[in-house]
Image: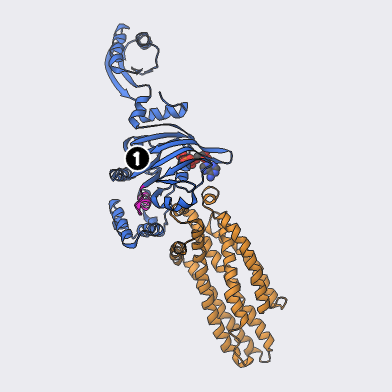
Chain colours: A orange, B blue
Amino acid sequence: MRLSQAWIVARHDLGMIRRRRTILGALIALPAGVSLGFPLLVWYIIAQSPGVGDAVIISFVDAFAFWFAIGGVMLPSSISAYSIVGEKTEKSLEPLLATPTTDGEILLGKVLAAFLPTMIAIWAGAAVYMVLIDEITRGTLGYLYYPNAAIVVLLFALAPIVAVLAIEISVAVSSRVQDVRSAQQISGVLFLPFILLYVAAEIQVFPLDTDHLLLLAGILGLVALVTFRICRRVFDRETILTRWK
Amino acid sequence: MIHTEGLTKQFGPVTAVDHLTLDVQEGEVFGFLGPNGAGKTTTVRMLSSLISRTSGSAEVAGHQIGDPSAELQLRHQIGILPENVGLYESSSAYENLEYYGQLQRVEATALRQSIERLLRMLDLWEKRDQPVATFSKGMKQKVAIARALVHDPVLLFLDEPTANLDPEASKTVREFILELKRERRTIFLNTHHLDEAERICDRVGILNTRLVTTGTPGQLKLGMSGRRTVAAVDGPMETMAAAIRARLGDRRIEIQGGSLIVDVSDPDRDNPEIAAAIVGAGGRLRQLTQVSASLEDVYLKLIHEGASPA
Ligand SMILES: Nc1ncnc2c1ncn2[C@@H]1O[C@H](COP(=O)(O)OP(=O)(O)OP(=O)(O)O)[C@@H](O)[C@H]1O
Ligand SMILES: [Mg+2]
């Protein structure tokens, strides 16, 4: 596995993605919405009910931050569906496979092309979110809530793992479908459990503290490992050329 | 350059290529002919190590196919024009070639020069920055051939380079292949077009799951029971045909309008006999012409009989 070869693939796909307005739009709009909209909501809650307790504020802030993990589900699958199903509909995979690049290098390139913009968008959005939340809650809480251990786990363990998992699933899905939109929709199913988790957090069933986030990251990490093996099997030169429909 | 021995590919119960044994020399343009589903594409994919073989062996450009350690080297030395051009439609011609050149590890300056040389040869240099989506089919095909050449491979596989092109576009693509031939490149050309094979190829092979025959187009045409003589005549056709058979022995004689088409093995010996037979049967000979079998005749005969000539 040569990283430099994978990087040629990734750089090319990043270039292609840059031309897609919808993908670019999602990469900007989603983190921007979360990092600006939710702090505004927190500010509104504090302004409207001055007596609100610290615990309530914190539970809101934590739950809203979970959207950066949800972003890890939503953003990369639309990119990787495009970069794989797109090649499939243009039939450009065969010439690509005919170059001295291994299947693993191509796959890694495609994973990177979806992973990097996603993480940059999430981290940039999260930075803005943390600054704004600190600014808004400092008066009420009496200390700076961010950065804290939970957000570190969320941004550097959970979100990347979730993004990798989402990419793997969209690779597997991409091998079976004919158009980019259905690939995105099917991969989007992964979005549901995360919304459920989010709701569970909001109603305090599954608090999104450091321990729970670590547990979640661990479980999803294992799932991602299993999915990786499926992915490698699906993304095999011969399978792609003779069995992908 | 290519040497295969008993190369076989099965897809489940379907045998796509059956015990192919074949040699292609360096600097040769080899035409691979065969009907739809004959296994031409499958052969090219095996030889370029895109798919595995079921059994048999093949050495391509000095590398054994199926040897994982040689696979990357092999793909570095060959260029492929696949059945579907598979260009990135939203990228320009230049970007398409650049990407493949980078994947082939061509050094940046050399790559720029190579792209410019190829696009100029193909009359596409002025259009290099336009998205490929705006190109005609013929232009796309040319870009795809250039893509296969950007790293200066020693061996080129072209899978039906003129399929679905109009006559004019076919002609430009064919002329480009002839130019590559002048550069002494080894080319393995899959095609349905017999006239194309006849004009371009040094040697052809006819495949119908099994390899039916190989040879130069000339050899194949000669190998097919010689040639035919067309006699334009007036008179009783059946009587004349019988008279010819009486002199030359039993053979195929077609009656087409006012012509008798006679299979001959040695025209110098047979034609005077034909003339004499016609006159003897009370006919009038207006014209006697010699036609040699076309590659198409050979092809159709071999494909239908599944037998090899002589
Ligand atoms: N992925 C596959 N799965 C199953 N069978 C296949 C597959 N690819 C090819 N075949 C079968 O193998 C045989 C040879 O196919 P191939 O595409 O090599 O023929 P071809 O000579 O290139 O035909 P064409 O002139 O139509 O391009 C056919 O019977 C085809 O149905
Ligand atoms: Mg074919």
Classed neighbour count for the residue bearing mark 1: other residues with Cα under 10 Å, few (<14), some (14–19), many (≥20): many
Residue B60 horizontal/vertical position (percent): 42, 44
Q: Is residue B151 magenta?
A: yes
Image: B33 above or below B261? below
Q: Would you say A217 lies left or right of A245 here?
A: right
Image: B261 above or below B16? above
In the image, what residue type sits under mark 1?
Answer: Val
Residue A93 horizontal/vertical position (percent): 47, 54
Residue B43 horizontal/vertical position (percent): 46, 41
Residue for point 62% across, 76% down: A66
Residue for point 66% across, 72% down: A216
Question: Pointer 1: what residue?
Answer: B29
**Quadrant in which the N terminus of chain B appears:** top left
Image: A163 above or below B273? below
**Quadrant in which the C terminus of chain B appears:** top left
Q: Would you say A22 lies left or right of A41 here?
A: left
* Chain of the residue on which disc 1 is drawn: B
Asked whether residue B293 is in view, the answer is no
Residue for point 43% across, 54% down: A99
Foreground pick, B135 / B257: B135
Residue for point 51% across, 58% down: A104
Image quadrant assignment for residue A133:
bottom right
Find the magenta span and give its range. Answer: B139-154
Count of picture labels: 1
Q: Circle 1 — which element?
A: strand
Residue B65 horizontal/vertical position (percent): 47, 46
What secondary structure do most residues of the magenta stretch adopt? helix
Image quadrant assignment for residue B198:
top left
Asked whether residue B188 is in view, the answer is yes
- Farthest residue, direction right: A205
